[in-house]
Image (spheres, helix red, strand yellow):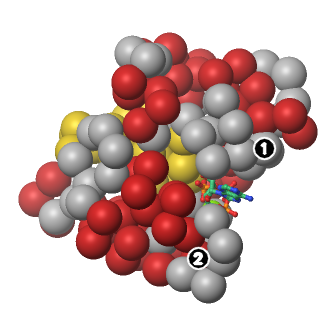
Amino acid sequence: IERTLSIIKPDATKRNLTGKIVAKFEDAGLRVVASKRIALTTATAGEFYAEHKERGFYGELVAYMASEPVVVQVLEGENAIAKNREVMGATDPAAAAEGTIRKEFALSKGENSVHGSDSPASAAREIAFFFSGLELV
Ligand code: ATP
Ligand code: MG
């Protein structure tokens, strides 16, 4: 059994899509084991996305992630990291497969509705970034 960190991004929380997105994860066999709605600052968003610091879209990404509250969740299941990314679909909604969250809901490559950890190491870092041991049961 594996855990991954999921973020429902500002474009989705703003359009009241949290429940529809969570339903897609649950339908795929993932379980929400921790969940909260938080407002990222540009400082916390910048630290979270530090790996993208040198990319041209970094400033835009950080400002966007701090523009509205987000919902951060820990999802658990068999192969949760890969399964979550499969349900999300490709980064660019134009390239995302039919039935995926990004195909259905994302507005653009930047405003793409969801984030999911991309490896066991990033899942461990990202879960610890948002949740304390007491919140993880
Ligand atoms: P995420 O990490 O959010 O799950 P991802 O792994 O599919 O998505 P990354 O390459 O890690 O994509 O990029 C992180 C995020 O940065 C993307 O989800 C998107 O919001 C934003 N992003 C990526 N590429 C671009 C781009 N070319 N223009 C604008 N924003 C971008
Ligand atoms: Mg990524």
Q: Residue at position x 24%, y 60% from top? A: 41
Q: Secondary structure at mark 2?
A: helix
Q: Is mark 1 within 8 Å of ligand 1?
A: yes
- Say left or right for 109 vs 30: right
* 76 versus 22 height, above or below: below
Residue 19, x across and y down, in percent: 41, 16
**Amino acid identity at mark 2:** His
Residue 132, x across and y down, in percent: 16, 64
Q: Choose the circle earlier in sequence order: 2 or 1.
A: 2
Residue 121, x across and y down, in percent: 53, 78
Residue that protrudes farthest toward the bottom in the picture: 54
Q: Which residue is mark 1?
A: 92
Residue that protrudes farthest toward the left in the picture: 134
**Amino acid identity at mark 1:** Asp
Q: Residue at position x 71%, y 19% from top? A: 104
Residue 14, x across and y down, in percent: 38, 24
Q: Residue at position x 66%, y 30% from top? A: 107
Pointer 2 local density, CA inside 10 Å: few below 14, some 14–19, many at least 20: some
Q: Which quarter of the figure has residue 87?
A: top right
Q: Is mark 2 within 8 Å of ligand 1?
A: yes
Q: Which residue is mark 2?
A: 52
Q: Is 15 in front, or is 7? A: 15
Q: Quadrant of ligand 2?
A: bottom right
Pointer 1 local density, CA inside 10 Å: few below 14, some 14–19, many at least 20: some
